[in-house]
Image (spheres, rainbow, N blue to C red):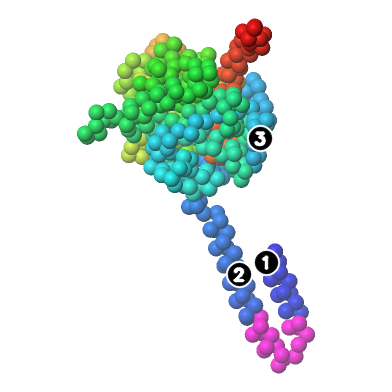
Amino acid sequence: MAADLIVRITSVVFALFSMTSMSDKRVFSRLLSCLVAISMFFLILSCSLLFRIGDNSLVPRSIFNLIVVDNDSTEPKSDSCTDLCSKSSQVNPVASCEPNQAMLKVYMYDLPAEFHFGLLGWRGNPNQIWPNVGNFSEIPKYPGGLNLQHSVEYWLTLDLLSSIIPNVRRSCTAVLVHNSSQADIVFIPFFSSLSYNRHSKIEEMEKKSTNDILQEKLVKYLNGQDEWKRFGGKDHLIMAHHPNSMLIARWKLGSARFVLADFGRYSNKIANIDKDVIAPYRHVVRTVDPNNSPPFEERPKLVYFQGAIYRKDGGVIRQELYYLLKDEKDVHFTFGSAGSGGIRKASTGMAASKFCLNIAGDTPSSNRLFDAIVSHCVPVIISDEIELPYEDVLDYSKFSIFVPASYACKKGFLINLLRGVKRDKWTEMWENLKQIAPHFEYQYPSRPGDAVDMIWKMVSRKLSPLHYKSRRKNRYKMSQQFLNSR
């Protein structure tokens, strides 16, 4: 509008200039010079304002960089599941979400900040439990590096808090309610993975670690809540994504539902696929733009693996595969870590490879699978005990290759299998990877079909049997009460 006005004024000035005498043209020349100067001033001012608006320094770097506001991220276009899902439901982002619109109504305990954002160094005003998530600049930063891979607790909590903030546009899958009797599930906002990563060591002059103390406090708190007593904790959701998180409390709170990376360090009585949710790791490599994803011919490496090679338990297969593959000319199989530019190297290496190995380590799962997915590098999963996120609605065989460990260790089997995958078949899986990759992106605010949205849908599906049994049990409640009153 401002630029258009300047153009019109300039046109009028030039028209008048052409109609004036020579003596008057000197005056007009001065006026024209002033107009040009004023126009340049407003142009520079406009550009400055635009740059300031686009400056992501107003947003916490940990949130902005983790695809909170990422112009290169691949957001799902409409459905919460792509064509590779056996079910889909269309959800559009909304500015506010009423409980009756949501798939899942969630009640969240107002635990003290020491259990959640306080672990990030956040300190609110007196009597303030939660940060103002409607203002991005007030959201505490989550630590980077490998801490990120277990950050599901952070994203889910932010999403619930934002569900009652009018100016935050998000999907309307889960919404926070303030009356527990209206809730489908009770959410426990304990950042257990962060607590383990940062506070599991016993500090000087301490008898117990902060992590252990927080778990003991949590158990005591929950056992005193009416909500816990109602179903014995069966309708509670606990985040314990790091395999070593909740080591003390898990045995005492095992009736609850857990959000986990896998079941590798849990007994079947505590955690199992019937009640618990497997959530994806937050990938640590950069997301490849689907419009610029290297195709078959532009990925010179056949196979890529970089990570710890010598592992215990089921992870011993890594060293067996290392000796089988290390001398193959188009295979990258080497030791690597997150330090010394390891993540950057992995980003480049995966994007330049046709197949990425996801091999069991100390536990059945790792973030390597999700790094491969967002790199559009076809995952080769060699982990017999692995459980996968969203597998009840997502067909992994459309974009991954599964190889039993016993087959993979046979000389020549794995390399010949992968060399035998033709260009057309690989390209089909590559195209599918580009479709489903957005389902593994954690972001704030959440979007339809991203990781946060998909996890809430998984929780909702797991709850159906619980509510079914509860309603059957209540069939004769009124008759029983009447009988007892007589």
Q: Is residue 460 left or right of residue 6?
A: left
Q: CA distance from mark 1 to mark 3?
A: 40 Å
Residue 463 picture quarter? top right
Number of residues whose C-alpha sits closer than 10 Å to that of mark 3, classed few (under 14), some (14–19) or many (20 or more): some
Residue 116 picture quarter? top left
146 or 343, nearer to the observer: 146
Residue extending farthest to the front is 486
Q: Amino acid at mark 1?
A: Ala
Q: Secondary structure at mark 2?
A: helix
Q: Earlier in the sequence, mark 2 or mark 1?
A: 1
**Mark toward the viewer: 2 or 3:** 3
Question: Where's the N terminus, which quadrant?
Answer: bottom right
Q: Amino acid at mark 2?
A: Phe
Q: Amino acid at mark 3?
A: Glu
- Range of residues picked out in magenta: 16-32
Q: CA distance from mark 2 to mark 3?
A: 44 Å
484 or 289, nearer to the observer: 484
Number of residues whose C-alpha sits closer than 10 Å to that of mark 1, classed few (under 14), some (14–19) or many (20 or more): few
Instruction: Where is residue 357? Give x, y as percent.
Output: 44, 24
Disc on res. 98: 3
272 or 416, nearer to the observer: 272
Disc on res. 51: none
Q: Disc 2 designates what residue?
A: 42
Q: Secondary structure at mark 3?
A: loop
Q: Earlier in the sequence, mark 1 or mark 3?
A: 1
- The residue depicted at 24 percent of the width and 32 percent of the height is 206
Whether 332 is drawn above or below 122: the answer is above
